[in-house]
Image (cartoon, rainbow, N blue to C red):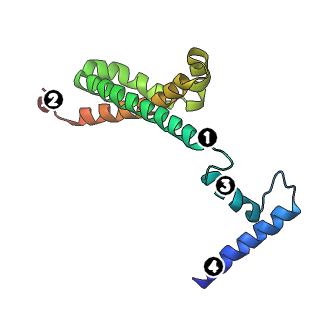
């Protein structure tokens, strides 16, 4: 325990020295970072933080809710109808393999810079894995149990 504390103190000391000797715009010592964090958490330096956090949380919940609803419905529909599932399953898997960063410029073009593009992006991030997981789960169930 004493060795861990010594390592922590040594690292903090090295950080403090490096922060004071280096460019202050690039490196901040812990003696300046901790009070700034305190001001941020008490909403002194950024009073709108709570409002913006709630807005972000709302956008995440809407995107996740839509992804769950659409993913469950689509995955179940593709899993119950085996022919449609075999036709569209590989397409969904291929779309899921597309890096997420590729989707966002198109979403910004279609939906603008407002919350809609962020919600659509979150929806796409959740839709494909949920759909493919439900599809895989339905395929594991005996067809007699699904009727």
**Which residue is found at the position 47% from the left and 28% from the top?**
124
Q: Would you say 145 lies left or right of 80 here?
A: left
Secondary element under disc 2, as helix, strand or loop, is helix
Front tag of 1 and 2: 1
Front tag of 4 and 1: 1
Q: Judge by depth and name the residue closer to the eye, 145 or 110.
A: 110
CB contact under 8 Å: marks 1 and 2: no
Binning the other alpha carbons within 10 Å of mark 3 as few (below 14), some (14 to 19) or many (20 upward) gives some
Residue identified by numbered label 2: 146
Q: Residue furthest bottom?
A: 2
Secondary element under disc 3, as helix, strand or loop, is helix
Residue identified by numbered label 3: 39
Secondary element under disc 1, as helix, strand or loop, is loop
Residue identified by numbered label 1: 48
Residue 30, compared with residue 69, is above or below; it is: below
Instruction: Give the Cα distance between marks 1 and 2.
Output: 50 Å
Q: Judge by depth and name the residue closer to the eye, 141 or 118.
A: 118
Between discs 1 and 2, the one toward the N terminus: 1
CB contact under 8 Å: marks 4 and 1: no
């Amino acid at each position: 325990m004493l060795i861990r504390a010594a390592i922590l103190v040594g690292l903090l000391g090295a950080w403090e020295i490096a922060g004071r000797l280096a460019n202050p715009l690039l490196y901040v010592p812990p003696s300046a970072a901790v009070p700034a964090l305190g001001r941020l958490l008490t909403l002194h330096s950024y009073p709108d933080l709570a409002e913006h956090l709630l807005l972000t949380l709302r956008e995440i919940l809407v995107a996740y809710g839509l992804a769950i609803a659409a993913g469950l419905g689509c995955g179940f529909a593709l899993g119950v109808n085996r022919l449609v599932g075999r036709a569209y399953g590989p397409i969904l898997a291929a779309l899921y393999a597309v890096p997420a960063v590729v989707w966002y410029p198109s979403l910004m073009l279609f939906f603008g810079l407002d919350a809609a593009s962020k919600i659509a992006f979150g929806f796409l991030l959740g839709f494909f894995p949920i759909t493919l997981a439900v599809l895989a789960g339905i395929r594991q169930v005996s067809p007699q149990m699904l009727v």
